[in-house]
Amino acid sequence: MKKIVLLLTLSFFISCNAQEKKTVTQTSSANVMPKTEAEWKSKLSPEQYEVLREKGTERPFTGEYWKHFQKGMYVCAACGNPLFTSDAKFDSECGWPSFDQAIKCSVNYHNDSSFGMDRTEVTCAKCGGHLGHVFDDGPVQTTGKRFCTNSVSIKFIPAKK
């Protein structure tokens, strides 16, 4: 399996501070919600399983939320952990849903040098599901960050009227 499992305790101590630091700390993608791969396969669609558990990427400009701008909250499709608010969403024209910030302590960050690239992977802090990557080319008026997120890894919950 491609995942490096570190102590879960370390991920909680580091994850909140990692958002504010330039240095990316490798944290655990071990489950806070321990499930077997068979349980994940039965809970998730094949597309969700490929992205959330196998670190896949959906094709750009195909996901449900890349041009979605209703008011509400985006949660992890695997465990329901609140990840992003609609106020943090912006149109980056990259083909995937983009956010300029995550809800505090909702995600973990990992160095990702796969495919010869140097990137920062973003995973759900609750279940370890792969969400996408974060880049430093977001809106300079806010955080300067672009959380490039797979639509299949998130679910939208509309704001109550």
Image (cartoon, rainbow, N blue to C red):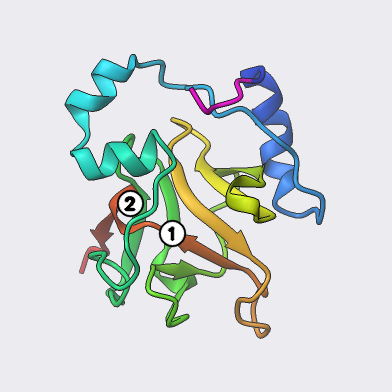
Residue at image x 28%, y 67%? 65
Q: Earlier in the sequence, mark 1 or mark 2?
A: 1
Q: Quadrant of residue 9?
A: top right
Range covered by the magenta-colored residues = 1-5
* Quadrant (top left, top right, bottom left, bottom right) of the C terminus: bottom left
The residue carrying mark 2 is: 154
Q: What is the three-letter code of the residue carrying label 2?
A: Ile
Which image quadrant for residue 95? bottom left
User: Picture coordinates of residue 103 (x, y %)?
Assistant: 53, 54
Marker disc for residue 121: none
Residue 84, image x, y percentages: 45, 58
Residue plotted at (35% across, 49% down): 75
**Toward which corner of the image does residue 51 lie, by quadrant?**
top left
Q: Which residue is mark 1?
A: 149
Residue 119 counted in the magenta span:
no
**Distance of label 1 from label 2 (alpha carbons):** 8 Å
**Dot 2 lies on which element?**
strand
